[in-house]
Image (cartoon, rainbow, N blue to C red):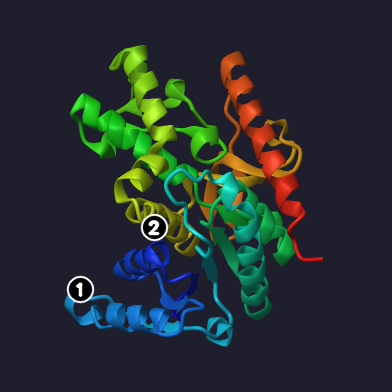
Amino acid sequence: MQRAKITIIGAGNVGATCAHWAAAKELGDIVLVDIVDGLPQGKGLDLHEAGPIEGFDVRIVGTTEYDATADSDLVIITSGVPRKPGMSRDQLLETNVKIVADVTAKAVARSPQAILIVVSNPLDAMVYTAHAVSGFPTQRVVGQAGVLDTARYRTFIADEIGCSVQDVHAMLLGGHGDDMVPLPRYTTVAGIPVTQLLPPGKLDEIVTRTRNGGAEIVNLLKTGSAYYAPAAATIAMAESILRDKRRVLPCAAYCDKEYDVGGYFVGVPCILGRNGVEKVLEVELDAREREAFAASVAHVKELCKAAKKFLPR
């Protein structure tokens, strides 16, 4: 059986760590791409040489040339300028639209049947950019956001209760980070509603910390942003797609009639399989949740409108 081929664009912390997780899971052969000559080659070779120690049999190469990415099954886009302390995701917009548009065009020209996972920030606008430039069907373009946000949410809940993170199941809707809409009603611990285990005030504290999860790490690192958890979240999505696991994961997926979004990529629970986004799952929302989700979607629309000005003509 032929191995899958995975291209990861951007050999910084997120991209290199994506390569690490993907190799450890033996998801396929990996091409690591970056504009800085020597960076992808060095990291790719270093990781390739870890194969005999960790026992993964995949080929890993680093390059600055996109020809090596030809016929990829999956393209993960992590390129862009990272957030710095005090910088909002929105401030990244113009620079990262141009970067993501450029790398998307180069990748899809060589892998017209690939599925795209976008990780670059501001996430919702970058997914919009990748879709606009690629011309791909909407099901083959998806953004990583909700898996990371729910991981943070689940971590903080497990820490507070003192239970295993594996037993915490949570759901979030909406945009990434500040715009996320947590749904405590749909959050359970081994099937027990979390609202029975934690008081409302404590849940509110956890939600606030989750919303600020990326900024918290940026402020601690001072010279960078999160990468272990974002990369792990991305590869969870990649595994579900490449192995057709059809996991239900919160992702930035295209919604038109779903949730009355009207044709934008927003965070929703969806089934990920070999065709990409196999299905968006709609859940019932109460009045407060609908209001919060509508506000989140409105901000996504504003971001996309702003991003559109910087797209190549």
Task: Locate residue 2, reporting x and y percent.
Answer: 46, 81
Q: Position of residue 191 (x, y in %)?
A: 33, 26
Q: Can residue 14 be seen in this view?
A: yes
Estimate how packed mark 2 is, as few (under 14), some (14 to 19) or many (20 or more) residues with alpha carbons within 10 Å. Answer: many
Q: Contact, CB < 8 Å: mark 1 with mark 2? A: no
- Camera-side residue of 285 and 92: 92
Residue 54, disc: 1
Amino acid of disc 1: Glu
| Residue 225 drawn above or below residue 288 | below
In percent of the image, x 67 and y 65: which residue is there?
101
Q: Image quadrant of residue 302? A: top right
Residue 286: x %, y % from top left? 58, 16
Question: In which quadrant is the N terminus drawn?
Answer: bottom left
Image position of 255 (left or right of 189):
right
Q: Position of residue 50 (x, y in %)?
A: 23, 78
- Looking at the image, can residue 170 be seen? no
Of 56 and 87, the residue lying toward us: 87
Q: Which amino acid does label 2 sit on?
A: Ala
Residue 78: numbered disc? none
Give 255 or 246, whichever is nearer the viewer: 255
Say which of marks 1 and 2 sits in front: 2
- Which residue position is annotated with label 2? 231
Which residue is painted at 46% across and 79% down in the image?
A: 31
- In what quadrant of the picture does the C terminus appear? bottom right
